[in-house]
Image (spheres, rainbow, N blue to C red):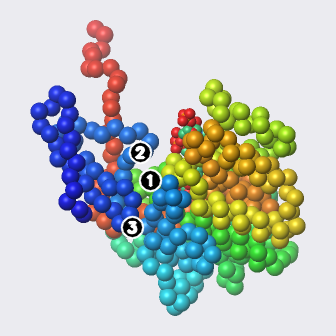
């Protein structure tokens, strides 16, 4: 940590405070304000716009430059040269695996893809039309009821086994959620298929017919998982860290991340983007929706646009757009009407002063929904795909915290309610 200092002078307080300032490898310096509570002061930062809640070595984002690094590697290079499971290994271990380490990791994940048969009974308690994220919150949290052998968070081996189980089982559970909604039998995972092929197999094959999975669609699915793998201290990852700081087991912590991701301002945006494009319905309606998005009296926002950190472009959106073009070409859907509306919307929004001034550009969710719909995944399952992809990031952050000298997260507040008053006699 550097020996830079910040000086704070507060009106009404004689003492002038000297606060340590730390420099990261890259990115903004941070002011260590931990000593302020002992001086009777709190910092105030609703939404954590200016707060570094932790130190981390996993992912770095430069919102102005559109940079996203996983353990130092740019997302564009990982999307082009790596694959999802290799990126999972990188996020968890900090380095790319050797060929032997990768083979061992891939085989370990393959051998954890099945779920306990009793877990399939959980589904019968849900309506067939239950929202898939409601079921995922339930069944992922319930995994801790099956794995009493790996719940000691202070045992590194337990943490590794839990990480493997979660990464391996999320696609199986996601496909089960889909099959349950359409009344088809669950498909068992197959160990002769790659991670993404296996997911598409469990989603779209049936016991009556097992079609070969298109390598283009499998590659696109793998890239979608990869592009969602981690994203620094976003809302759902911060939820996982806060839940983990209480000592909750990893399955409960990941379930809390799934719940936080569900919101339309966060991971629920990909589902909201498709619903918005379908509501727009025709290019002639775009101007009306652009006006709604600008109208402060109207709660409507242009879903898939804007980001708390990226104020120029989301590097993932660029790769996602390229993948979108590849998938639609493979499927002969280059003239997809939703894609045409999306591209017209993007052109208008990125030239409109309201959006440009506020740095509102397409984010990771803007094109992912079009790809997923083209693959045949129903809109309400989109956020489940996001949660599946984000699982290694959640686990890597949870593990980084549990492996460090952490304390329970407990923010304070600016209290503006009633002062002490007596109950009426
Ligand atoms: C994800 O944090 C992460 O890293 C998230 C994520 C990840 O990988 O984990 O990247 C995934 O969540 C991507 C974001 C998906 N959400 C959406 O696409 C929903 C639509 N976007 C907005 O809800 C919004 O842009 C947020 C939530 C993404 C960001 O909100 P901020 O940073 O709190 O920004 P803000 O709400 O303060 O907006 C700043 C201004 C406001 O106008 P003014 O008050 O300055 O006049 O921009 C406006 C907002 O009204 N604005 C929008 C807008 N987003 C912001 N106006 C119209 N349409 C939008 N989409």
Q: Position of residue 412 (x, y in %)?
A: 32, 39
Q: Position of residue 74 (x, y in %)?
A: 53, 70
Q: Where 72 sits versus 194, above or below?
A: above
Taking the view exactly as shown, the residue that stands out farthest to the top is 425
Specify the quarter for ligand 1: top right
Give whichever of discs 2 and 1 has the lower sequence position.
2
Q: What's the CA distance linking mark 2 and mark 1?
A: 11 Å
Residue at 85% across, 62% down = 334
Residue at 30% across, 60% down = 23
Label at residue 48: 2
Quadrant for residue 201, please give it.
bottom right
Q: Is the residue marked by circle 2 packed among few (<14), some (14-19), or many (20+) residues within 10 Å?
A: few
Residue at 76% across, 52% down = 343
Secondary structure at numbered mark 1? helix
Q: Position of residue 380 (x, y in %)?
A: 72, 52
Give whichever of discs 3 and 1 has the lower sequence position.
3
Say if disc 1 is inside 8 Å of ligand 1: no
Q: What's the CA distance linking mark 3 and mark 2?
A: 19 Å
Q: Where 282 sits versus 82, above or below?
A: above
Observer-nearest residue: 76 or 416? Answer: 76
Secondary structure at numbered mark 3? loop
Quadrant location of the N terminus in the rendered image: bottom left
For mark 1, what is the residue? Answer: 238
Say if disc 3 is inside 8 Å of ligand 1: no
Label at residue 57: 3
Q: Kindly check if marks 2 and 1 are in contact, taking CB atoms under 8 A apart as contact.
A: yes
Quadrant location of the C terminus in the rendered image: top left
Label 3 or label 1, whichever lies nearer to me, is 3
Say if disc 2 is inside 8 Å of ligand 1: no
Residue 310 in sight in this render: yes
Q: What's the CA distance linking mark 3 and mark 1?
A: 15 Å
């Amino acid at each position: 940590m550097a020996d830079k200092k910040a000086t704070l002078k507060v009106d009404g307080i004689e003492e002038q405070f000297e606060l340590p300032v730390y420099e990261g490898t890259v990115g903004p310096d941070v002011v260590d304000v931990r000593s302020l509570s002992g001086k009777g002061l709190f910092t105030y930062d609703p939404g954590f716009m200016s707060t570094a809640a932790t130190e981390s070595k996993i992912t770095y984002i430069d919102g102005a430059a559109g940079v996203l690094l996983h353990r130092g590697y740019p997302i564009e290079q990982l999307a082009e040269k790596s694959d999802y499971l290799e990126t999972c290994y990188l996020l968890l271990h900090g380095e790319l695996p050797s060929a032997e380490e990768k083979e061992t990791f891939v085989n370990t994940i393959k051998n954890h893809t099945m779920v306990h048969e009793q877990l399939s009974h959980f589904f019968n308690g849900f309506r067939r039309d239950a929202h898939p994220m409601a079921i995922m919150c339930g069944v992922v949290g319930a995994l801790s009821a099956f794995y009493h052998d790996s719940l000691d968070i202070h045992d590194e081996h337990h943490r590794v086994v839990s990480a493997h189980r979660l990464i391996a089982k999320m696609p199986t559970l996601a496909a089960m959620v889909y099959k349950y909604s359409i009344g088809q039998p669950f498909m068992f995972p197959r160990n002769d298929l790659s991670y993404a092929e296996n997911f598409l197999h469990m989603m779209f094959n049936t016991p009556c017919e097992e079609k070969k999975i298109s390598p283009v669609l499998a590659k696109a699915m793998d890239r979608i998982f990869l592009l969602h793998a981690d994203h620094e201290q976003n809302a759902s990852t911060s939820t996982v860290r806060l839940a983990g700081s209480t000592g909750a087991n990893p399955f409960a912590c990941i379930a809390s991340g799934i719940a936080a991701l569900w919101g339309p301002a966060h991971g629920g945006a990909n589902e909201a983007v498709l619903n918005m494009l379908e509501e727009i319905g025709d290019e002639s309606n775009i101007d009306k929706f652009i006006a709604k998005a600008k109208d402060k009296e109207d709660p409507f926002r242009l879903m898939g646009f804007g980001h708390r950190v990226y104020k120029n472009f989301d590097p993932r959106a660029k790769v996602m757009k390229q993948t979108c073009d590849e998938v639609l070409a493979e499927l002969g859907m280059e003239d997809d009407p939703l894609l045409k509306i999306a591209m017209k919307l993007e052109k208008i929004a990125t030239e409109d002063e309201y959006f440009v001034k506020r740095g509102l550009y397409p984010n990771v969710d803007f094109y992912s929904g079009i790809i997923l719909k083209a693959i045949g995944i129903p809109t309400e399952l989109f956020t489940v795909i996001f949660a599946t992809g984000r699982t290694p990031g959640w686990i890597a952050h949870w593990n980084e915290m549990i492996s460090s000298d952490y304390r329970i997260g407990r923010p304070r507040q600016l209290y503006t309610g009633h002062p002490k008053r007596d109950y009426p006699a």
